[in-house]
C-alpha cells in the first residue's frame, strides 16, 4: 500500500510542485517582505525564527493531501476492491500513513535546502537537528491520522478543501509559527502557547538552536515534553476513530 501511494506521487508531479510551492512562498514572503518589520524575543534573525514554523506549517497542510487521497479511494470504490482480495484490513490505512510520512520526509528535505539558501542554520549540531526533524515528522504522523479520519467521513473529495483550509489557517495564525505569543495580547498569547503546533515549533527551535525559545510560562518551559504529548494524544484519538469508521465502510 505504501508503494502504491508513492507511485501516485511519482505519476502526479504537479501535486508535489503545488505542495512545495506554498511553504517556499511563505518563506520568501514572510522572510523577506515582512521580516524587516518583525521582532523576535531576545533578538535574532527573523528568518531563523520563521523556518521551524514553516516546517511545522507544511506538515499541517499535508493533512489535506492525506484526506483527499483517502476520500478519492472511497469515492472510486477502491476500498471495496481491496476488501474483496485477501489482504489485511489495516493495510490501506497503515500504507497511506507510511506513504505520507515518506512524502513528508521529502518535503522536509526540500524545505531544509530552501532554508539554508535564505540564511537559516541549525546551530546545535547534527544530532539535535535530527531530533528536531524527528519531532516534526512525529507531528506529521499524528496529523496523517487526522487526515485519514477526515477522508473517511467527508461525503466526497471536493469537500476536503472546504474543511481543511478553514481548519488549518487559524491553527497556524493562532500559534508561534509567525509571531511569538509574548508579543500577542495576553488571552491570545495563552491560546497560541497551548496550540499543539506551538509545542513542536518551540521544541524544534530549541533543538535547532534558533532564536525565539524560552519564556516564563509552564508551556514554554516544557515545550519538548508537549511536542511528544500532543502528537501522542492526536494519534490516540484519531487512529481508533479512523479504524472504526473504516470498518463501518467495509460492512
Image: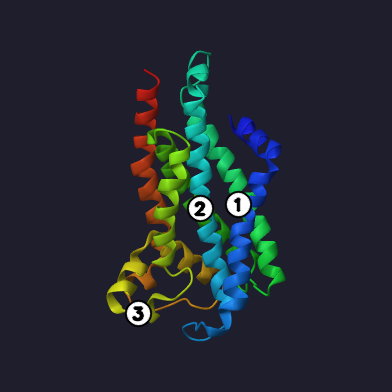
Q: Is residue 177 visible?
A: yes
Image location of residue 31, percent across then percent down: 60, 74
Q: Relative to the observer, which residue lies in front, 16 or 211?
A: 16
Q: Crowding near pointer 3: few (<14 within 10 Å), some, many (20+)? A: few
Q: Report which residue position mark 3 lands on.
A: 216
Count the labels in the image. 3
Residue 110 placement: quadrant: bottom right
The reply to whether the C-beta atoms of the residues labelled 1 and 3 are less than 8 Å apart is: no
Establish if 220 lies above or below 139.
below
What residue sits 68% from the left and 45% below the top? 14
Q: Dividing the image into 4 quarters, which one contains the N terminus?
A: top right
Instruction: Calculate the distance from the C-alpha at mark 1 to the C-alpha at mark 3.
Output: 36 Å
Q: Counting residues from the N terminus, which is met first, the one under dot 2 or under dot 3?
A: 2
Q: Residues within 10 Å of mark 1 (few under 14, many from 20)?
A: some
Query: Which mark is drawn over residue 5?
Result: none
Residue farthest to the bottom, as pictured: 43
Earlier-in-chain disc, 2 versus 1 = 1
- Mark 1 lies on a secondary structure that is helix
| Sequence-first disc among 1 and 3 | 1
Name the residue rendered at 66%, 62% in the picture: 112
| Nearest-to-viewer mark from 1 and 3 | 1
Answer whether labels 2 and 1 touch (C-beta < 8 Å).
Answer: yes
The residue that label 1 is drawn on is 19
Give how far across and how far down residue 20 sits, in percent.
63, 54
Classify mark 2: helix, strand or loop. Answer: helix
At numbered mark 3, what does the secondary structure look like: helix, strand or loop?
Answer: loop
- Classify residue 241 by image quadrant: top left
Viewer-closest of 125 and 100: 100
Q: Spatial distance from mark 2 to mark 1, Cα to Cα? A: 8 Å
- Where residue 165 appears, as percent x and y from the top left, is 45, 53
Q: Which residue is mark 2?
A: 61
Q: Nearer the viewer, mark 2 or mark 3?
A: 2
Amino acid at each position: 500500500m505504501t508503494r502504491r501511494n508513492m507511485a501516485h506521487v511519482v505519476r502526479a508531479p504537479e501535486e508535489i510542485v503545488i505542495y512545495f510551492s506554498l511553504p517556499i512562498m511563505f518563506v520568501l514572503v514572510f522572510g523577506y517582505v515582512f521580516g524587516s518589520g518583525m521582532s523576535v524575543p531576545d533578538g535574532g534573525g527573523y528568518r531563523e525564527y520563521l523556518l521551524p514554523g514553516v516546517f511545522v506549517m507544511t506538515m499541517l497542510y499535508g493533512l489535506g493531501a492525506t484526506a483527499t487521497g483517502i476520500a478519492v479511494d472511497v469515492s472510486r470504490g477502491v476500498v471495496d476492491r481491496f476488501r474483496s482480495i485477501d489482504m489485511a484490513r489495516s493495510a490501506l490505512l497503515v500504507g497511506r500513513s507510511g506513504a505520507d510520512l515518506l512524502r513528508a520526509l521529502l518535503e522536509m528535505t526540500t524545505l531544509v535546502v530552501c532554508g539554508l539558501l535564505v540564511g537559516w542554520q541549525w546551530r546545535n549540531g547534527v544530532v539535535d537537528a535530527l531530533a528536531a526533524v524527528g519531532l516534526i515528522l512525529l507531528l506529521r504522523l499524528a496529523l496523517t491520522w487526522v487526515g485519514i479520519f477526515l477522508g473517511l467521513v467527508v461525503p466526497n473529495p471536493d469537500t476536503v478543501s472546504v474543511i481543511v483550509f478553514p481548519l488549518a489557517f487559524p491553527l497556524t495564525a493562532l500559534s508561534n509559527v509567525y509571531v511569538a505569543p509574548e508579543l500577542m495580547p495576553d488571552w491570545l498569547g495563552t491560546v497560541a502557547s497551548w496550540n499543539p503546533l506551538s509545542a513542536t515549533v518551540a521544541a524544534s527551535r530549541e533543538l535547532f538552536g534558533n532564536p525565539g525559545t524560552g519564556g516564563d510560562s509552564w508551556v514554554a518551559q516544557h515545550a519538548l515534553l508537549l511536542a511528544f504529548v500532543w502528537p501522542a494524544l492526536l494519534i490516540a484519538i484519531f487512529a481508533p476513530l479512523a479504524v472504526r469508521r473504516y470498518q463501518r465502510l467495509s460492512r
